[in-house]
Every structure is written in structure tokens, then in C-alpha cells.
């Protein structure tokens, strides 16, 4: 499905730079290039070869005025990003040069591209499916190597392949159900409810396995919210600075020095982490410190992970026990800090009070325990396993919601199969699950959803 017009946009970020790129896509791309581009060697324009880079100038055809010195390349479809003819003009990075060149291109017959329209054309022309197209914007916005790797894997079709396998299993099941419904008297294998239940369970497990990756996927995409909590002067700010590798928070021997929450975004083991150093939680009459403590509680409530620091060199006090009571059911790493001064807190007691919590001995000021803490965070994010480079994670919220709905539909079908209900009713939920998974890759999706997906993109992509 080729579009009938030619689009153009600046494909590089606005601002100063060595090079800025203008991209065109559509059947008139080469014709427009011929209008505004003059090769340096006086080559005949008809001789411009596919995928060869040419040096020359952008020239206003009306005034013959040189606009910029450029490199230009013409790429003939369908073996291009959009599956259409594409031209890319490499200008100087000045926004003035880019705007002037783009204005000439638009005047010569191109239309200014909408947000994400190049990738949208790639999708509509069958070059990418919808999940691959969505991965493009994740690649552009990736902040860590792992985030980039996961997005690249999705763009290369890993998610599409997995979803395709599940949809094929659902289609095979739909065929069996339909045959038994439409030809009950023919000499065909009867689909028993036991066999139907087994097939549905197998498919349900496949969807659940894919859905289970969404927790780590969400964290890689949005970042892990981590709150550092503890009573005053136990080493929270020292830990913050150790993780940041710089002195960001004030470290003193005076309890209550941090009176507000300090937030930083860092990368730990290639995981984006939103780290919050909170004010020490304790009873106080200081109005300013009280505000900081309230903010600490807010950070605690929204955290995916809580790092609870104890002064391990002293027995636990009532303030420590009060915090522990609030940690039940949370993802917690307990740091027994100041071990260089001797440990007075029983690790066994911590394990009894917070079963499942990871306990690490540390001397943060000396750098001891930091590596163990970072390893523990990585294990928590990836469920005890360090993510392999080729592992698939679901990172897109739209995909997560569709997987959840598809899982619910197939489970409803499984319940009806166990109860030996009519095949017609079971078929509806099996087909519903198949259609929902199709929305992930764009096989069954409305135009409104397509528009919403590509509205997230930037111009020129």
C-alpha cells in the first residue's frame, strides 16, 4: 500500500551539530532531489545511481542561489526503511541551513511529514509490523544498554515471532472447534473436552510466560523507583553518594541533615533507577524536618524497591522497629551498615522479621557492600536471573494490557471447557484471545490505535 504523495522532514535533533539530515519518502523523492540538488561534478542527473552518495549543493531553482553544501543519496524502494523511494540530504548542522533546505524541498512538491509518518509508512507498506514500529521509538529513547538491546530485539521481530506462535496455536484450536461445530456427522476426529482443556491450558501457559516478563520490561522502560529509608544518621546520604559516585547529598554526623528528599536518575547494572534519598524517619518537632519526613513517606509508598539502612553497629531501636513494621509485603533490601565498627544487629532476627528480604552487610563510607547491593538489585529486577542478551521482555504498556486481556479470555475458555459448556461459547473466547494478540502486531487493529501509536514519535522518524 504505497502512499500517493511525498513527505519530507528534518530527521536529526534540532540544535547545533556537524551534520543535519533531511529525509524524503515517496515516489517523487528523486524528482524533487533533481530540482534542488546540483552535483559538483556536473554529472547528468539521470545518472544518479541508487545508494551512491553524491557531493554537491542545494540551489534555489528560482534564484540560482546556493543554500548549502551537502551530500545526498537516493535509495530506490522497496528495499528501504519505508519500502518507498527515499532521499536523504546531509546538510551542515545549522538549523538555518536545514530550514532553508527543507523549505525548498517542500516548495518543490513534498509535504511536511507528520510525527512518526516515516515509520507509519513502513508499517502500512508491510516493512514492519506494529510491535516492531513501536520498538523504533524505544530505541530512540533508550537510556541504557539493556534498554537498547531489548528494544532492538523487538524491532528485529522477536516479540512478533513469539506472538505469532501463540496465535498459530490459537488458530489451530479454532479450526478444530469449527470443524467439530460445522461437520459433527463427518468422519473426523472428535474434539473431546479433555483434549480441548489441555490445548487451552498449553496456550494459556504460553501467554502467561510472555506476560511474566512485563515486570522487568516495565522497569527497563520506565525505571526502577528506589527509596533509601532509615532513621537519621545511619548512612543514607553516604549510600546515595556512593551509588552516584559523587557528593550530592550532605553527609555529616548531625542527625536530620537531609531535610528533604533528594532524587537522582542513575544506571545500576544497565537498569535505569530513580533513586530517592529520604529524610530520616523519626519523631521530631522541627516543622521543616516534618515536611521532609512526610515526603519520605510518599517516596516510600510509590517505591518499587526499598533499601532500608540500619546502623549495624548498634542494637535496633524503636524507630527501626517502627520502620520494619511498614516494610511487610514490600520488595526490601536491608543494609546492615557500619560493619567496620562491629555488628550488633542479628541478621537472623532481620530474616525473621522481614522474610524474603535480602540482607547485606556494608561499610558504605569505605565502599564495602556497594557491589553486592547492585547485584541484588539486578537479581530482583530479573527474578533471580541475570537477563541474557537474547531474552525477550515485554516493555510496552499497550502490549501488557493486550496480553492481560488475551490471558483472561483464554482462561475463560478453559473454565467453560472444564464445565463442558457449548463449543460455540468457547469458540468466542478463543477467537477473542487470538484477535487481542493480533492487535499487538497490528493484524487486527483500528486506525485510531494506529494514529495513537505513531503520535508518540518525533518528526522525521
Image (cartoon, grey):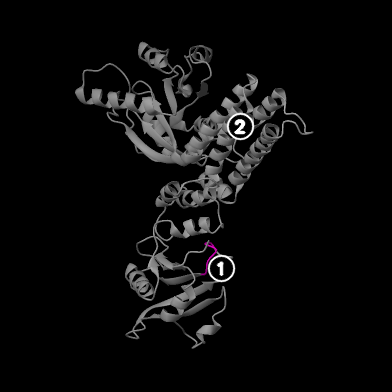
Q: Position of residue 375 (x, y in %)?
A: 55, 33
First along the sequence among labels 2 and 1 = 1
Q: Position of residue 412 (x, y in %)?
A: 57, 25
Quarter of the image for residue 14 reads bottom left
Q: Position of residue 174 (x, y in %)?
A: 65, 36
Name the residue tied to disc 1: 77
* Start-end of magenta stretch: 81-85
Callout 2: few (<14), some (14-19), or many (20+) C-alpha neighbours within 10 Å? many
Q: Is residue 442 left or right of residue 178?
A: left
Residue sitting at the far front: 185
Secondary structure beneath label 2: helix
Q: Is residue 72 left or right of residue 322?
A: right
Quarter of the image for residue 105 reads bottom left
- Does 138 appear above or below 281? below
Name the residue tied to disc 2: 427
Secondary structure beneath label 1: loop
Which of discs 2 and 1 lies nearer the camera? The answer is 2
Q: Nearer the viewer, residue 273 or 442?
A: 442
Q: Is residue 382 visible?
A: no
Amino acid at each position: 500500500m504505497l502512499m500517493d504523495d511525498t513527505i519530507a522532514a528534518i530527521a536529526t535533533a534540532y540544535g547545533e551539530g556537524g551534520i543535519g539530515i533531511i529525509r524524503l519518502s515517496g515516489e517523487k523523492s528523486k524528482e524533487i532531489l533533481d530540482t534542488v540538488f546540483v552535483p559538483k561534478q556536473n554529472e547528468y542527473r539521470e545518472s544518479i545511481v541508487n545508494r551512491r552518495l553524491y557531493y554537491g549543493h542545494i540551489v534555489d531553482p528560482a534564484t540560482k542561489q546556493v543554500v548549502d553544501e551537502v551530500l545526498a543519496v537516493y535509495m530506490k524502494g522497496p528495499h528501504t526503511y519505508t519500502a518507498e523511494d527515499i532521499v536523504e540530504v546531509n546538510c551542515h548542522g545549522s538549523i538555518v541551513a536545514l530550514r532553508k533546505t527543507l523549505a525548498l524541498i517542500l516548495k518543490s512538491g513534498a509535504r511536511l511529514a507528520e510525527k512518526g509518518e516515516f515509520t507509519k509508512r513502513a508499517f502500512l507498506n508491510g516493512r514492519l509490523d506494529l510491535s516492531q514500529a513501536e520498538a523504533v521509538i524505544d530505541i530512540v529513547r533508550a537510556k541504557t544498554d539493556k534498554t537498547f538491546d531489548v528494544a532492538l530485539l523487538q524491532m528485529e521481530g522477536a516479540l512478533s515471532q513469539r506472538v505469532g506462535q501463540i496465535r498459530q496455536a490459537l488458530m489451530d484450536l479454532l479450526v478444530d472447534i469449527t470443524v467439530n461445530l460445522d461437520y459433527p456427522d463427518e468422519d473426523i476426529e472428535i474434539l473431546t473436552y479433555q483434549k480441548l482443556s489441555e490445548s487451552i491450558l498449553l496456550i494459556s501457559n504460553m501467554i502467561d510466560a510472555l506476560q511474566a516478563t512485563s515486570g522487568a520490561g516495565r522497569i527497563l522502560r520506565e525505571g526502577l523507583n528506589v527509596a533509601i529509608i532509615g532513621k537519621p544518621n545511619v548512612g543514607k546520604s553516604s549510600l546515595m553518594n556512593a551509588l552516584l559516585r559523587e557528593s550530592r547529598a550532605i553527609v555529616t554526623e548531625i542527625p536530620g541533615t537531609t531535610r528533604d528528599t533528594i532524587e537522582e536518575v542513575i544506571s545500576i547494572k544497565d537498569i535505569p533507577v530513580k533513586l530517592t534519598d529520604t529524610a530520616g524517619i523519626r519523631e521530631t518537632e522541627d516543622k521543616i524536618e516534618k515536611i521532609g519526613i512526610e515526603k519520605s513517606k510518599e517516596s516510600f509508598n510509590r517505591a518499587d524497591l526499598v533499601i532500608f539502612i540500619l546502623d549495624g553497629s548498634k542494637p535496633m531501636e524503636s524507630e527501626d522497629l517502627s520502620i520494619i513494621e511498614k516494610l511487610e509485603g514490600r520488595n526490601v533490601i536491608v543494609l546492615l551498615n557500619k560493619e567496620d565498627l562491629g555488628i550488633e544487629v542479628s541478621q537472623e532476627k532481620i530474616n525473621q522479621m522481614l522474610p524474603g528480604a535480602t540482607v547485606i552487610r556494608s561499610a558504605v563510607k569505605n565502599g564495602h557492600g556497594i557491589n553486592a547491593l547492585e547485584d541484588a538489585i539486578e537479581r530482583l529486577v530479573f527474578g533471580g536471573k541475570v537477563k541474557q542478551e537474547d531474552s525477550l521482555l515485554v516493555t510496552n504498556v499497550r502490549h501488557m494490557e493486550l496480553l492481560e486481556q488475551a490471558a483472561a479470555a483464554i482462561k475463560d475458555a478453559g473454565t467453560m471447557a472444564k464445565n463442558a459448556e457449548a463449543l460455540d461459547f468457547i469458540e468466542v473466547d478463543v477467537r477473542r484471545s487470538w484477535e487481542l494478540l493480533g492487535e499487538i502486531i497490528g493484524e487486527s487493529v483500528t486506525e485510531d490505535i494506529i494514529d495513537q501509536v505513531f503520535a508518540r514519535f518525533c518528526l522525521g522518524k
